[in-house]
Image: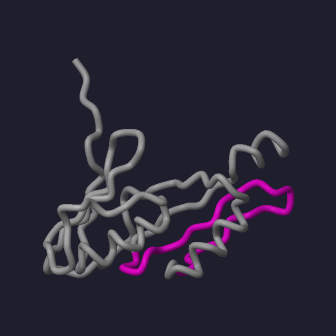
């Protein structure tokens, strides 16, 4: 017997707003059943899972124990710039001179995530 991951759930202060950021990140819409002020909001992903944002009263206080690693369809560096432009913040730059490595960003509520190299960059650089 096995289980499928249905949702990756993220506690947050404003579910709809944070879902809006992640909607822009993933290019997937917020569920048509979710509206501003709702205590939860879903961004369904094409692979069948979803990012589920649940409003909680407490603020984020420590580093995430689990985070998302993103593999963009454009170059890593271009994606980092795009994400910074829509509200992410730089946490740590782990890029190496040989082109390998990743960048740690945070979403507007401080949840860390990584941007890795694209598939094309991996194929080119090894």
Q: Is residue 107 magenta?
A: yes
Left or right: where 2 falls relative to 87: left
Magenta-highlighted residues: 89-110
Quadrant showing the N terminus: top left
> x and y percent of residue 76 in the render?
69, 61
Q: Which residue is drawn at 13% across and 80% down?
A: 57
> x and y percent of residue 47 in the render?
41, 39
Q: Which residue is drawn at 39% across and 49% down?
A: 45
Quadrant showing the C terminus: top right
Left or right: where 49 falls relative to 38: right
> x and y percent of residue 38 in the render?
14, 74
Q: Of all residues shown, which one is farthest toward the front?
A: 32
Left or right: where 101 falls relative to 55: right
Q: Residue at x 17, y 73 (%)?
A: 55
Q: Of all residues shown, which one is farthest toward the top?
A: 1
Q: Is residue 24 magenta?
A: no
> x and y percent of residue 3 in the render?
24, 29
Q: Please, is residue 32 above or below residue 110 in the view?
A: above
Q: Which residue is drawn at 58% across and 79% down?
A: 84
């Amino acid at each position: 017997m096995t289980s499928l991951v249905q949702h990756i759930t993220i506690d947050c202060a404003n579910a709809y707003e944070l879902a809006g950021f992640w909607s822009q990140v993933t290019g997937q819409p917020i569920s048509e059943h979710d509206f501003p002020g709702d205590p939860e909001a879903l961004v369904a992903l094409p692979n069948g899972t979803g990012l589920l944002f649940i409003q909680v009263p407490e603020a984020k206080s420590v580093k995430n124990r689990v985070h998302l690693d993103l593999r963009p369809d454009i170059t890593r560096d271009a994606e980092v710039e795009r994400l910074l432009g829509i509200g992410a913040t730089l946490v740590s730059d782990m890029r190496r001179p040989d082109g390998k490595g990743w960048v740690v960003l945070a979403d507007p509520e401080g949840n860390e995530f990584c941007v890795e190299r694209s598939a094309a960059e991996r194929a080119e650089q090894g």
